[in-house]
Image: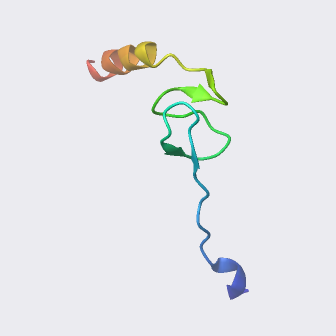
Amino acid sequence: RKGNLRTRLTNLSPCPQCKKLILPHTVCPYCGSYKSHSVVDLAIKSKTRIVKEGR
């Protein structure tokens, strides 16, 4: 039915570390933290991105 085809707004919540808006229950792409714990080391992630782009 057409009643189910409506679009829904996504809920955004602020990151506890950097205060930017992110999707809930995901790692923050800006600071790499999840629930106030550092999960992703962004320095290593940026180095691998540079190596992949340099090919």
Tell me where residue 2 sits by quadrant: bottom right
Residue furthest to the left: 54
Query: In this rendering, is residue 55 above or below 36?
Result: above
Give left or right: position of 33 versus 31.
right
Instruction: Determine the residue positioned at 48% across, 28% down.
Output: 31
Q: Position of residue 18 (x, y in %)?
A: 48, 33
Q: Residue at x 59, y 47 (%)?
A: 23
Left of 35 or right of it: where is 17? left
Q: Residue at x 59, y 66 (%)?
A: 9
For the image, the number of numbered tags is 0
Identify which residue, 19 or 33, lies in the foreground. 19
Instruction: Find residue 34 and report its horizontal and vertical position in percent.
Output: 63, 29
Residue 17 horizontal side relative to residue 52, left or right: right
Q: Look at the image and tell me in which quarter the N terminus lies.
A: bottom right
Residue 26, position as x, y percentages in the image: 63, 38
In this rendered view, identify the residue nearer to me: 20 or 5: 20
Residue 7, compared with residue 48, is above or below; it is below
Colouring style: rainbow
Q: Which residue in the rendered view is the most extreme toward the bottom?
A: 2
Q: Nearer the viewer, residue 1 or 31?
A: 31
**Is 48 situated above or below 23?**
above
Image-quadrant location for residue 15: top right
**Image quarter hosting the C terminus:** top left
Of 42 and 20, nearer the camera is: 20
Q: Residue at x 70, y 85 (%)?
A: 3
Q: State whether residue 31 is above or below residue 6.
A: above
- Place of residue 10 in the rendered image (x, y in percent of width and height, measured from the top left): 59, 60
